[in-house]
Amino acid sequence: MKKRLLPLGVQSFSKIREAECVYVDKTERIYRLVTAAMGTVFLSRPRRFGKSLLCSTLAALFEGRRELFTGLAIDSLEWDWKKHPVVHIDLNPANYSNGTVELLSVVRRYLNEDAKKIGVQLSDDTISGQFQELIMKGYKSLSEKVVVIIDEYDKPLLDTIDRRETHEALKNELRGFYGVLKSCDQFLRFVLLTGVTKFSQVSIFSQLNNLNDISLDPDYCDLCGITHDELETCFQPEIERVSTENGLDRQEYIDKLKRFYNGYRFSKKDVTVYNPFGLLNHFNKHGDFGAYWFATGTPTFLIKLIEEQRIDILEIEGKKIALSEFQRFDAGNMDALPVLYQAGYLTIVDCSADGVYTLDYPNEEVRAALAESLLHYFLEDSNNKYSKYDVADALLEGNVDRAMNALRTIFASIPYGIHLKDEKYYQTIVHLVFRMMGLVALSEVQTADGRIDTLVVTRKQVYCFEFKLNGSAEEALAQIDSKEYLLPWRGVGKKLVKVGVSFDYEKRNIKEWLAGEQ
């Protein structure tokens, strides 16, 4: 079966349409946005989630390039196709660690390119002055209100989040630049700012009292990303090709796609989307299930934030945060959980009537890859390969002794300088190893009579692990029995295995283990 052209890494709407690449039609939602939204619109989404393609599509729409939209939903809707002056700035490609010098260079280049397209010249020395000049001259030149699109508005700030002086200089420059939007409001038809995070209103958008944040708006929850219906409709040939090439049952294959790349939810509305970057790479790589999206970023800063705020990794799933906590991001005042959500490492899984959001990992890609990154951090980037596949294979085949010996190899790789403080540290390492290999691993599981340290569920087995730092494997095993931790799993058709593990504080490793069936 011939492979179709997939827009892998292509963020230009015109290139996608002219090359006849696969395109997921979002134009009905875009039409809804541009005809309903007022003021300056802000949209936060994780990196590589389609924000740049959205911006490019909007630019083409307002430039009146109807030929690119032939056959799409908006082509049959009531749109006037007037040519508007468009200012389109993308702050993503550059690195701003040098501060305002790079920012000024990038912004000036875009402003002058857009001025040339519109047919006007700029004379002001500052980027704020040039921005205002371009808007006013653009409006005068074409007799139509101006459209402003700024993609990844926060990239300069994220690049310098740990360099306070440079960060503050960039923030001051951007505050004045974005403030132009308020003073030129009467000349503007539509304004969109996109980014990964929303810095606090006071720090960046203090002059924009009409900022319309649609990041959590149910009406636009699938504006970026690919819904399951869109997957089955737009990628039917890819699904058939990959399942045929790999000899997979079609429905089982689709279910695995959903587990691995779906799960992102951006509002109280129960609608989830696939990460487009991961999905397209998967199809392009003949169906290999890789951590494609995760590999494009380095979550080191976020992992350090987790450590600094003493967030319990074992209890990060199911954490609840209020709506107001999504609005607190700033260099000197940030909470790890909302930032992990905005960056795409956590997602919404539930929302209560009073606006409390429950967060969890979106899918298997993120769950396993983030676990591996956390494990590298805990082990200080040890070169040991963790014997992770030995652990996984052993548990899947029911060989507890082989799995525990592989875990001992992992603990032996921990640098001596790391102080293994308590039982929770050992438990966290084991939990991350299980998660890294993609197993269903639950820790601190509440029961009627206590908490299970770690539960691992495979296709054939349920493993109940109890850990003791200052105790014996026999005591751990006895606790599993006395508190009947495995009682809820009886009758499910799986082998129930209890594993008691004791750690040796002096040797900083697993001392002994005992296993049995129930």
Image: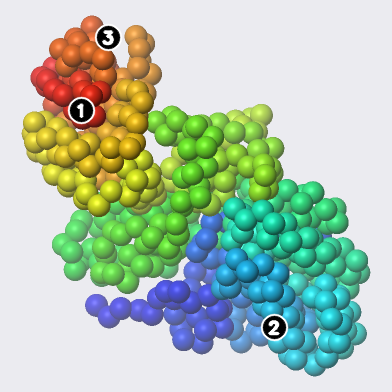
The residue positioned 66% from the left and 85% from the top of the image is 65
> Label 2 amino acid?
Arg
Residue indicated by mark 1: 507
Q: Residues within 10 Å of mark 2 (few under 14, many from 20)?
A: few
- The secondary structure type at the circle numbered 2 is helix
Nearest to viewer (mark 2 / mark 3): 2
Residue 84 in the image, given as x and y percentages of width and height: 78, 81
Relative height, residue 141 to residue 435 (above, below):
below
Q: Could you tell whether 292 is left or right of 488 in the image?
A: right
Q: Do callouts 2 and 3 mark residues in contact (Cβ within 8 Å)? A: no
Residue 12 — which label?
Answer: none
**Circle on res. 483:** 3
Quarter location, residue 336: top right
- The x and y percentages for residue 504 are 21, 23
Q: Is residue 130 above or below residue 219?
A: below
Distance from disc 2 to disc 3, alpha carbons, whole Å, reads: 67 Å
Number of numbered callouts drawn: 3
Q: Quadrant of the C terminus?
A: top left
Q: Residue at x 28, y 59 (%)?
A: 289
Dot 3 or dot 1, earlier in sequence: 3
Looking at the image, is mark 2 or mark 3 earlier in the sequence? 2
Disc marking residue 109: 2
Distance from Cα at disc 3 to Cα at disc 1: 30 Å
**Residue 58 appears in the figure:** no
Type of amino acid under label 1: Lys
* Label whose residue precedes the other's in the sequence (2 or 1): 2
